[in-house]
Image: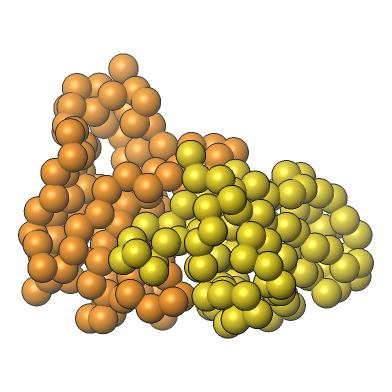
Amino acid sequence: DQQVKQNSPSLSVQEGRISILNCDYTNSMFDYFLWYKKYPAEGPTFLISISSIKDKNEDGRFTVFLNKSAKHLSLHIVPSQPGDSAVYFCAPTGGGADGLTFGKGTHLIIQP
Amino acid sequence: DAGITQSPRHKVTETGTPVTLRCHQTENHRYMYWYRQDPGHGLRLIHYSYGVKDTDKGEVSDGYSVSRSKTEDFLLTLESATSSQTSVYFCAISDRDRGRTEAFFGQGTRLTVV
């Protein structure tokens, strides 16, 4: 059973507009939520994270929102740029040694 | 960039042959992970290690074994490769001992089993 769901396999956004990527989870033990970005033929790179004690974390153009009661988080990118075109993975963790649980990813395409 | 090197980067092997993938780190992190990435599945954990000779199974461990005889090296072995193990394999390291939750990934190994 999927613990982490990214229900949009792909998302197309115009350059300069806001991109919103969503993630839902079922495991109440998750207490830290990470987003990774992946380009083709490269390893995933860490983008931004949020602790379960917060509801928002911002880093430049990237903001992550967490709604614990709904078990939902979202990544906002504004303004979207061509270099943001990549696959984005939601990856929460419960702090155990087994690390991160990944969603299936959302392929973000930024249109010029 | 975190000092993680995966080798080989690409490999084609025949069904039934053993294959070993290597992950080498220069960060001295205790935690190391092997994931596989397949279309429609995201990244799935195969095995992980929390110290020398300390390893455990992940979500998709069947058909795989690992060894960690040194802090810097984490080996993934396919005892008898099957076509279903054709995938891209990623190694990751994490500095959880300092309270860091993020993992840093290698460039990946593309394995094709024919």
Residue A92 in sight in this render: no
Which residue is situated farthest in the top direction here?
A112
**Quadrant where the C terminus of chain B is found in the figure:** bottom right
Residue at screen point 73% across, 44% down: B9
The correct choice, above or below, for A59 with respect to A6 in the image is above
Residue at screen point 33% across, 75% down: A95
Residue at screen point 50% across, 61% down: B29
The correct choice, above or below, for A75 with respect to B95 in the image is above
> Is residue B54 left or right of B11 when viewed as pictured?
left
Residue A86 in sight in this render: yes
How far across and how far down the image is residue B42, in percent? 48, 58
Seen from the viewer's position, the closer of residues B9 and B25 is B25
> Is residue A73 left or right of A56 when viewed as pictured?
right
In the image, the chain rendered in yellow is: B
How far across and how far down the image is residue B34, in percent? 59, 64
Which corner quadrant of the image does residue A5 belong to? bottom left
> Is residue A112 left or right of B23 when viewed as pictured?
left
> Is residue A62 left or right of B51 when viewed as pictured?
left
Residue at screen point 38% across, 32% down: A85
How far across and how far down the image is residue A93, in percent? 33, 70
Counting labels gives 0
Which corner quadrant of the image does residue A42 belong to? top right
Q: Chain A is drawn in which colour?
A: orange
Which corner quadrant of the image does residue B56 belong to? bottom right
